[in-house]
Image (spheres, rainbow, N blue to C red):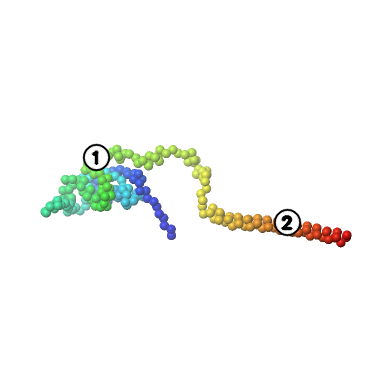
Amino acid sequence: MPTITRSANTEASGSNPVWHVIDAKDKTLGRLSSEISVILQGKHKPTYIAYLQTGDYVIVINAEKVRVTGNKLTQKMYYRHSGYPGGLRQQTLQEVLKKKPTKAIQSAVKGMLPKTKLGRRMLSRLKLYAGGDHPHAAQVNVRPKIMEEVAEAPVSEDLSISDPQEQKPTSQPITRASRTQTKTTEPEKKAVGKAAVKGTLGKSQKAKSKSENSTATSKETTTKKGQEE
């Protein structure tokens, strides 16, 4: 079975990031974070490439109103270390949401992204806000460049025909049937050439026979004249 290879668009201009606004009010922390990580990586697009930044921007509002199930507010712990002996610090999820509401979503999304330079660049496209307002209204309302080019492109006269059957293509595409037809005509051409060669040979043989007959008749006439004399 033949293998199909597709060339990927490695240019930076090939990706047109879109700005998504997500309201975190009354949404589960884990499910919301997984949805955000998919958008940041670009896995929701058919043009996803693992080694390129093909994801979009994500704006999360009402980060302080995110919810969790069970007793995670008091049981889930966040740890950090100062680097010195005895420098271990820990906080519960409830304390984190009171002190810095966006940290819970940021740490959850960070754990779902690649631990590389590309993953850090993806995380930089995440914009978190504790309240319901954000300063990115201009970016959210703008349209992608590809959509603008398609919308502003003029319609050609050929496309104005209502019936698609009336549109006649200017050039006929080469198909397997046409290729087989060309292949079948080659032996026919050879046969025609052979017939032409045979025809020329037959004509030359007839001419030779006529010349031989004429010479024979001339010899007979000369012999008869000699006998008469």
Which residue is the site of mark 1?
133
Q: In this view, does 157 lie above or below 224?
A: above
Give left or right: position of 187 versus 96: right
Give left or right: position of 147 versus 26: right
Residue 109: x percent and y percent?
25, 50
Give left or right: position of 23 versus 223: left
Residue 190: x percent and y percent?
60, 57
Q: What residue lies at 21% left-to-right and 43% top-to-bottom?
A: 130
Q: What residue lies at 24% left-to-right and 40% top-to-bottom?
A: 133
Sequence-earlier tag: 2 or 1: 1
Cβ atoms under marks 2 and 1 closer than 8 Å: no
CA–CA distance in space, label 2 to label 1? 106 Å
Which residue is the site of mark 2?
207
Q: What residue lies at 23% left-to-right and 43% top-to-bottom?
A: 129
Location of the N terminus (image quadrant) = bottom left
SS of the residue under disc 2: helix
Counting labels gives 2
**Mark 1: few, some, or many residues within 10 Å (few <14, many ≥20)?**
few
Residue 10: x percent and y percent?
35, 48
Q: Nearer the viewer, residue 200 or 66?
A: 200
